[in-house]
Amino acid sequence: MAVSDHVDFPTFMEGVKKRNPGQDEFVQAVQEVAEDIFDFIADKEEYHAQQILRRIAEPDRVVSFRVCWEDDAGNIRVQRGWRVQNNNAIGPYKGGIRFHPSVTESVLKFLAFEQTFKNALTGLPMGGGKGGSNFNPKGKSVREIMRFCQSFMTELYRHIGADVDVPAGDIGVGGREIGFMFGQYKRITNEFTGVLTGKGLEWGGSLIRTEATGYGAVYFLANMLAAKGQDLTGKTAVISGSGNVATHAAEKIVQLGGKVLTLSDSGGFIHDPDGITQEKIDWVKAHKTHRRGRIEDYCDEFKGASFTAGKTPWGVPCDVALPCATQNELLGEDARTLVANGCIAVSEGANMPTNLEGVHHFKHAKIMFAPGKAANAGGVAVSGLEMSQNSERRSWKEEELQQMLKDIMAGIHKSCLTYGDQGGGYIDYVKGANIAGFKKVADAMLAFGVV
Ligand code: GLU
């Protein structure tokens, strides 16, 4: 037998921990996947012999670089930037850029790892990558953000390309930042290509890209409910976050007849028992993006709502929950509270918002639980459609794109059923998503031999 054939799960995880010291988020993401993959490959010799899981859990490369910029007061500031190119077995590396003080190599490695499976699930030819910086956009002027984005791209441009690696937005990076980065890329290379997605509609962007992640998470939720003969009409929803993903998830819940009770930010959450209507969502969008205000101001604007400082919204009783803020925002005790309060379905709009204990509890309670790599894949899916439109040098109509997004989310749901149906009416969506995503990437890797 070859040296490392058939290591067992604990030995595999020991190795991951040893090779990635202090990278807790990355280890967590690998564990969540490996728990299911070990079962799946138990009788599949080739995946073991070729060390496929071990190879997917080792990024193709991690590029780290210095980003210097000058603030408005003339001080020179130094940040660290990264691009993690995890795997390009099925297409160019693809994944967002995150600007947030919590960004570390571990966070970006976990995100790039997750992205590899998520992108495979969309059915589109995209590999997995992620990038970002510990730059904090909060409180910065627009000129400062522009100078930072330009400096970041001055290094990043040599590592990316329309057929190499195609970044997009993530936390702290929206249309404005993509504009600054695309402008700098174009200036340096003198090329107009689809090197970034999430672009403005006038310069190669796709319709519905902005809405896609939040809408997709709700479409996935609707698919899960439909599999049980239910829908969103009259259901109460608790949502965390108040950015692009959360507000569009809220919008789609309202459109499908549900009632949204909460939104949140890093300061706490608001609870509106009357329901957060479209008009209120529009106010939140404007307040958070244009005015860069706090969610607690909602209570001055709309009477009857209350603000709870420093807490997440999981204690508010609901039928369905959508964590749409950030990683590890829903812990084991929150999962227990949600289930005890009667929550029947959770759809993750953010990446890995539920910690391992929470995931295990949802599985144990056998509620409908859609992991981010399946539920929030709508965003990157429309990014994939943006890439296609750029390659064809044309734009598709909104109705076409809406339908494609719906079809892709239904397709992901179906893939989850293939590997996640446990019988007796229980579908393990975590297992389904992990195996379906893994199998596609793994089979491509087998075809390439040892590279
Ligand atoms: N950052 C988003 C995600 O987590 C989108 C990535 C993209 O569009 O490339 O999937």
Image (cartoon, rainbow, N blue to C red):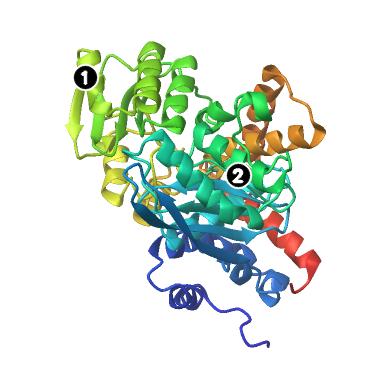
**Does residue 422 appear left or right of residue 353 in this picture?**
right
Asked which quadrant contains residue 20, the reply is bottom left
Q: Amino acid at mark 1?
A: Cys
Residue 30 drawn at (x, y percent):
50, 62
Task: Residue 299: give its label.
Answer: 1
Q: Which residue occupies the foreground of this view, 100 or 270?
A: 100
Name the residue rendered at 44%, 62% in the picture.
106
Q: Is residue 77 visible?
A: yes
First in residue order: circle 1 vs circle 2 = 1
Q: Which residue occupies the foreground of this view, 224 or 393?
A: 393
Name the residue rendered at 20%, 12% in the picture.
303
Looking at the rendered structure, the secondary structure element under dot 1 is helix
Residue 46 drawn at (x, y percent):
73, 72
The residue that label 2 is drawn on is 416
Q: Is residue 217 above or below residue 110?
A: above
Residue 263 drawn at (x, y percent):
32, 28
Name the residue rendered at 52%, 53% in the picture.
131
Q: Is residue 7 above or below residue 439?
A: below
